[in-house]
Amino acid sequence: MSEVLEHAIPEYLQQERTKPSKLPASYVPPFPAYVSRYPRSIKEIVMAIIGVQYRSKDLDDGVVISQLSEFMTASSSKSIQPTSWELASVTDQAGAYNVAIIAYWPSAATHKEWGSASGFEAWWQGLEAGETHGWFLEVLSPSMDRWEDVYSGNEAIEGAAHMREGVSGPIHEHAYWGSMRDRIPAAQTDDLAGEAVGSSTLDGGKTASRVQVPGRKNLAVIRSGQDWSATLPEERRLYLETMHPVLLKGMNFLRDHGSEIGCYSCRLMSIIDAGTQKPDKDRTFGLAYFDDLASLEKWSREHKTHLDIFGGFLQYAKKLNNEISLEVFHEVLVLRPEQQYFEYIGCHTGTGMLAALTK
Ligand code: HEM
């Protein structure tokens, strides 16, 4: 079987390694996984998280989200609209209700053009912190050598994959610890070392006004998604009873104790239907920011909360004889400082990368 497995890294981004791969000798993965194949013309992907933070859920009257959604579809900027976008929400550790758009563009230039043509940029610059809510903007623009995605199936398409031109065959580099790094082109020649989380992080209160957080060296971002919408009742029950609780535990650990292990922020977000603005409860994603790819690896490889998720998944697959309709995927980005833009207006200080600001 191994001769038909594909390299996760596309040929044009392959380099002679100075950093050895962790791929075990004669390795055959226990189950298949696939990666997106993007057109070579795409040099970078822009992922923008544009959100509003209400002090509590009952303050959300849907108006702001409709307004934000209109920027995504503004006809003045049809050719430069995001390739895909979705709404997602989370009630965070401070009890604040965050609703965000997560949107993708195929270049920084298109994203910039959209910002001005749609009116978003001018609107954003004019915002002020409100009594009931704050705002956040997180724009991540990895070059393709600092991006990897992996899917449990070869049909589901999420996020950036809407701009892919195809999907790989089953890949070689997955399901062993270190495989994430082996799929990142830049890691062939670079350790991608980051900067440790500062010793003292802000908490409590809200930021008075507009705060920009500078980019960090090799910030590692993961968006890990789960979609159980296609599951039949037996699998759905198994997912909700065995997988969802351990996922929640893991995400709560990263959210509440992440700073102990190099995680700045973690949000387990539920996808919301853009039309009804109601949660589509069958899809979630964890969005987490780490100081270093090595910290993310360490948590996934060693911490009980991810080992429970991982172990739970193996049992889940076994119980269903590998006939699984659950789709899981992730997108991992390791960013240069200039590939990050974080701005917060009147949000509480535990929001996103605000946690990276030390007192
Ligand atoms: C790796 C399962 C959620 C972080 C893996 C692997 C599995 C798995 C099976 C090995 C994948 C492969 O390479 O083929 C799951 C399931 C999840 C889940 C079933 C949810 C239901 C998460 C979340 C995060 C995360 C939310 C972080 C926010 C990681 C990382 C790796 C990994 C970083 C790669 C480790 C490496 O290659 O060194 N997970 N996971 N996972 N997972 Fe999870």
Image (spheres, rainbow, N blue to C red):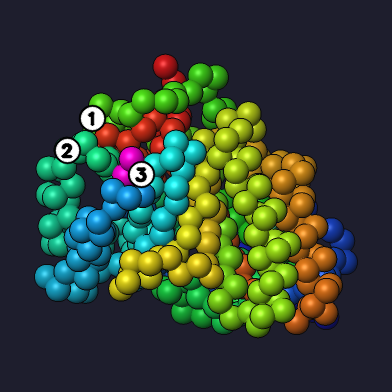
Image coordinates of residue 14 in percent, x first then y, are 60, 62
Q: Which mark is residue 209?
A: 1
Q: Secondary structure at mark 2?
A: loop
Residue type at tag 2: Glu
Residue type at tag 3: Ser
Q: Are marks 1 and 2 in contact (CB under 8 Å)?
A: yes
Q: CA distance from mark 2 to mark 3?
A: 18 Å
Q: Secondary structure at mark 3?
A: loop
Q: Which mark is residue 35?
A: none
- Give above or below for 14 relative to 298: below
Main secondary structure type of the part rendered in magenta: strand
Where does label 2 land, which residue?
Answer: 128
Sooner in the amino-acid sequence: mark 2 or mark 3: 3
Where does label 3 land, which residue?
Answer: 56
Identify the image quadrant of residue 314: bottom right
Identify the image quadrant of residue 4: bottom right
Residue type at tag 1: Ser
- Give above or below for 112 relative to 296: below
Sooner in the amino-acid sequence: mark 1 or mark 2: 2
Residue extending farthest to the top is 359
Image coordinates of residue 70 in percent, x first then y, are 20, 66
Q: CA distance from mark 1 to mark 3?
A: 19 Å
Tell which tag, 1 or 3, sits nearer the viewer: 3
The stretch of residues the image draws in magenta is 52-56
Is residue 216 or residue 263 the one in the foreground? 263
Q: CA distance from mark 1 to mark 2?
A: 7 Å
Is residue 40 or residue 99 the one in the foreground? 99
